[in-house]
Amino acid sequence: MLSIKGLCASINNKEILKGIDLEIKAGEIHAIMGPNGSGKSTLSSVLAGREIFEVTAGEVIYNGKNLLELPAEIRSREGIFLAMQYPVEIPGVSIVNFLKAAMDAKRKHLGLDPLSPSDFLKLMKEKQKVVEITSKLTNRSLNEGFSGGEKKKNEIFQMAMLEPKLSILDETDSGLDIDALRVVANGVNSLRTKDNAFLVITHYQRLLDYIVPDFVHILYDGKIVKTGDKSLALELEEKGYDWIK
Amino acid sequence: MNKPNDIKQRFLKNLSLTSDSIFSENKRKSFIKKINDLSFPDIKNEDWRFTDLTPLLSLDFNIIKNKVTSEDIQIEKKIIKNLDSIVLVFINGILYEDLSNITDNKLFIGNISKGKLLQNEIINKYLNCLPEPNNIFALINAAYSVDGAFIYLPENYISDKPIQLIYINDSEISNSLSQTRNIIIAEKNSQLKIIESYISLSNKNNSFTNSFTTVFAQENSNIEYYKLQNENEHSFQINNTEIIQAKESSVNLNTISLNGGLIRNNSNVLLNGENTEIFLNGLYIIDSNKHIDNHTYIDHAKSNCSSNELYKGILKDTSTGVFDGKIMVRKDSQKTNAFQANKNILLSDAAKINTQPHLEIYADDVKCSHGATVGQLDQEAMFYLRSRGIDKDKAKSLLMYAFISDIINSVKIDELKQSIKHQVFNKLKMDSIL
């Protein structure tokens, strides 16, 4: 599904990613762990198409397409979803209307008719259950005045609605209490199929007790320095990051 | 004759004193004497530094009286949909009663040129305490206006129907001039909702609106006052509004400017009794080479009053804007709360805004704050929307709407809010997904 080769990226001429190689196949869950400043969030941003980062070398092939050539909105419509670490507050635009616009854009891109309002609302109801939120929340303005937990649940809710092929979770667990963490993880697990894949970026092993990865990669100083299975996360938890340096 | 005087004489030559006026001939002569002593402001004048009136003052304007029918002006498209209201229609500054719908006979509503209102003792009392006009445009209006809305709410009267004042400029034949002198009086414990719309009827020639409104908000009265400016690019507008508030009154003035060649709003508020509150909200969205200027002046003349001012604007292309907000807190006006903010988004490198607060505070126990921002659309928010599949243009529109949504949501009349939303969507080229 996704093939990253020799990816280098910088911001303001400072190199952050220094040659990333990563293969993700449908049905897999990959976790990326690493200390602060190792380039975890940069990697997710570059994959989602945030323009402030400049790709200086390497390639990313996504389902046969050169991903780096596509603008952010096309990547989204092609099935890439980034659950953000800091979702932005947008007053005056309700989640319902925002998601209708996003869904319509995606369906148009895929050559499908827009969902009828009743089908759309039915789908909303169904997906709200996945992340245990109510219409009260989804009728509110996007993220405005939301608690940290509500913002993260809302990210997973959007993910559930848009049904992406590749979901990237950028430190979705940071700042979550154990209940919210459980809800978010259950959401992810229930959305998992043999056709989609997840890239879970996290600082802590805790999340991986709930979302069990097939592969764990350690990112350090812009490179993947170690890859293993879920036991690697436990090892990191025990020893800290110092031993990989 | 010097040059400024030439301009003034040429500008005034088409105006004449008529018998239709609320002011006596002597009074009007005193206004004319003052006009003779003044000249039109130029950009050397501190109050007009960023608003150049040369394009306006190089034109000739006439008062045009047309025979029009409601079909001609398609009045049903000009009033706010589904809103049960009292409607007064002015064309080129003159009330057309046959186009209007004045159904509430408990109120004095009509035009001030009708002598019968002047027989009334109460009304005369108010006319006698109108403040003297303090600038040349207000003086010209006072001396030469022939009509205007007169609205009088008696004590304890709750006006459930909003009053819509529709000001139409028709410059089909030649440059047109509208000079309405409006007087609005809300007596003790009364409540009033008022909506003004400024509209152009023709794209030929130019129009100039020089309007002057005085509002008396008496003890414990409550006024919601909306101004919608949506004329064409050939229009000029100077809109003088003075609000005089007695104790415990509350006034909400919303000025929404969506189109117009040059707009200058002078909104002056005198908080003349304790425990009064004023909310001034403003919204402007302008493009091409248009110009919008909001000057506000809030005079905290008594203690325990609060003023809350929020103006937001989006400027595109080579458009220019001015916000100038003065707050005066008098020596004995303790426990004053004054809040002022002006926030702007510039969508092009050539668009410009000059924003300036002036605070004069002579009391010591006050809370005052002010702030101004000028920025671009938030790139983080842009990315957030695009990462969900929403294209750049639509994301831009959504973020512009998000920026101004608090002003639109402060509109308390639902039908009016929908109408404003609709106009804003058109302006921002959005379909109505919201």
Image: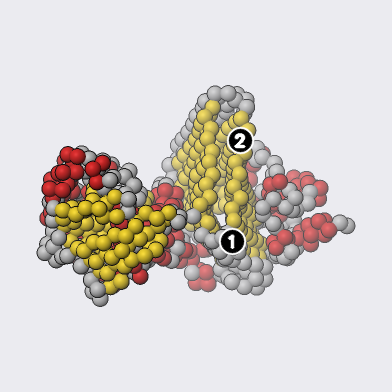
The secondary element bearing badge 1 is classed as loop
**A121 w.r.t. B162: above or below:** below
- Give residue B209's position: percent from left, percent from top: 63, 58
Left or right of residue B161: residue A218: left
Vertical side of B248 occupied by B79: above or below: below
**Is residue A153 shown left or right of residue B377?**
left
Residue B318 appears in the figure: yes
Residue A64 spot, x, y in % from top left: 24, 73
Question: What residue appears at the point 56 percent right and 64 percent down from the top-left corner?
Answer: B317
Q: What residue appears at the point 35 percent right and 60 percent down from the top-left corner?
A: A8
Q: Which amino acid lies under the numbered mark 2 shown in the image of this protein?
A: Leu
* Residue labelled with disc 2: B359
Q: Label 1, on which residue?
A: B350
Q: Nearer the viewer, residue B248 or B68?
A: B248
User: At x 39% / y 63%, what residue is drawn?
Assistant: A56
Query: Where B207 falls versus B283 (above or below)?
Result: below
Q: Chain of mark 1?
A: B
- As drawn, the residue found furthest toward the right would be B1
Q: Considering the image in quadrants, where does the N terminus of chain A appear? A: bottom left
Of pointers 1 and 2, the one earlier in the residue sequence: 1
